Image: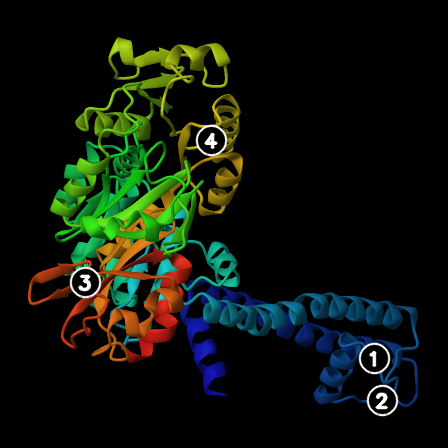
Amino acid sequence: MKILAAQFSSFIRSRRGRRNIRLLLQMLAMLALLVIIYSVLFHYIMLWEYRHHEQRVQYSWVTGFYWTLTVMSTLGFGDITFQSDLGKMFSIIVLLSGTIFMLILLPFTFIQFFYTPWVEAQAAARAPRALPEEEAGHVLLTDYGPVTTALISKLNQFGYPYSLLVQELDEALRLHDLGVNVVVGHLDDPGTYLRTRADRAALVATTASDTINTSVVVTVREVAPRVPIIATVTDPAAVDILELAGASHVLQLDVMMGRSLARRAIGGDAMTHVIGRVEQLLIAEANAARTPLVGKTLRENRLRDLGVTVAGVWERGRFEPARPETMITDHTVLVLAGSQEQLLNYDEQFAIYNVSAAPVLIVGGGRVGQATARELAGRDIDFRIVDRDPQIAAEAKRLVIGSAAELEVLERAGIQKTPTVIITPHDDNTNIYLTIYCRRLRPDVQIVSRATLERNVASLHRAGADFVMSYASMGANAVFNLLERSDILMVAEGLDVLKMRIPTGLQGKSLAESSIRAKTGCSVIAVSKDGSMDINPDPRAPLPADAEIVLIGNVEAERRFLEIYRDSSA
């Protein structure tokens, strides 16, 4: 009863509820007027029928109302009837008008005052307009797109509460049915952020257009001056505007994607290429093709003698945790962890192998393609950009104008000699098409591709891409990295570096004793304590209680580690 009373109270306070009540009162007033008129006419017609009878029948006013209501409601008991044609015509009029009123009044009353409030109450339960007053430490999201979808998956994986703000109720209900936690509210309304407790949120992330993001940042800052706000940006000119509006961090995802793709390009040599950093610890990749490593296992190669740890290997885009029996092939790319000095030791051993001066081929000269070119130029790696637009900002000698789907264009760009092809268009179907084409032309070339949607990563690998960087995953990880207490670094699609306090179940045990790699697939590559980091720690040394470990592994390995050790984590 309390719920029904609350629903009715909310209904009558709404503008539509008050309008419906006015309509109902007007119809009831019209009904009452008709009943009075029909009751009066009933008496006059009855008097007219009995004017020639010796015994006149007298009916009370109550009887008149009784007859009118029984006829209008179609009950028609038949105890009081007219005998004349005039009386029967009057009865027909009363009956028809009553039927019409029943067809209008009863459905209107039921739908507007019972069914609609019930449906809206059910919808409100699925798509609320406010969060509980005690809500705190949650993440607020403002746009449902590829980045947000990947971020929600990440938040669920690590147990962070979140709410997605949706402006339209129908869209909110659709997303709720997909399992998304939604709250209905306008993004430019300060009340929305008051009702969603933005002042106590751990983070507000907005990934819509530049103009909407600016509006969101300004509005959130009005009600939550201290909450961290992360905004994505497309136009570089909007970075300063968003920062002036109050954004804590502005992410240029196109630039970040270009840099990530460029770091994946081996460039034809066998040297280490850094793809991530956690304090002093560097994560790098090195191509094993045409080096003495090929044809031997990791145990036989004894790379740990150089100080580096092989955290895993890539085989045609598939990451495999490093094991002593892992065989190195011409297609293997090593994932190495070590300090700068340790990686230099590796380079001194293998820098003479697999050297190529041929330029890297970049397909697509948009924002991502140009960011990739700038990153390669910073590494002194030559490149060629293939694009149909002659206005691309690139040196004439580095720009090949034409469609990458044409063999003649690719040959002019150097497809037959290039060590790496980087595919950057934003359309995943186009990227799959170009990947298949380039792989057919050059079975031995390294292909690095961008994927906008996570679901297309596997398709690009099947098409022949060696490495795929997901725009959605990269953006989600960039936002997640900025969450308080979070220290996750995505070094490749599906391969993360995780830093966390040593779980109580591992404290005092050695790496060899705990068998973390065998149980979970994650590798411990460093132990951090009191501001110093022990890179590639001794596997026989016990893990201290008041320290952090740095792990590397794919998403599935992360999940297994957290399932096993999260409950015992400090």
Residue sitting at x 41%, y 47%: 327
Mark with earlier residue (3, 2):
2
Disc 4 is placed on an element classified as helix
CB under 8 Å between discs 1 and 3:
no
Mark 3 belongs to which amino acid? Answer: Pro
Q: Quadrant of residue 291?
A: top left
Q: Earlier in the sequence, mark 1 or mark 2?
A: 1
Which of the labelled discs sits on residue 57, or is there none? 2
Q: Nearer the viewer, mark 3 or mark 4?
A: 3
Residue at the spot of label 1 = 46
Give the mark nearer the N terminus: 1 vs 4: 1
Q: Which residue is mark 3?
A: 537
Of 136 and 194, nearer the camera is 136
346 to 393, vertically: above or below: below
Residue under the point 33% across and 40% down: 293
**Front: mark 3 or 2:** 3
Callout 2, which amino acid?
A: Val
Q: Residues within 10 Å of mark 3 (few under 14, many from 20)?
A: some
Labelled disc at residue 240: none
Q: Are marks 3 and 4 in contact (CB under 8 Å)?
A: no
Q: Quadrant of residue 367?
A: top left
- For marks 1 and 3, the one nearer the N-term is 1
Where is residue 279 drawn, in percent x and y? 13, 53
Marks 3/2: CA distance? 113 Å
The one of 453 and 520 positioned closer to us in this rendering = 520
> In which image quadrant can residue 132 be found?
bottom left
Secondary element at tag 3 = loop
Q: CA distance from mark 1 to mark 4?
A: 89 Å
Residue identifier under label 4: 431
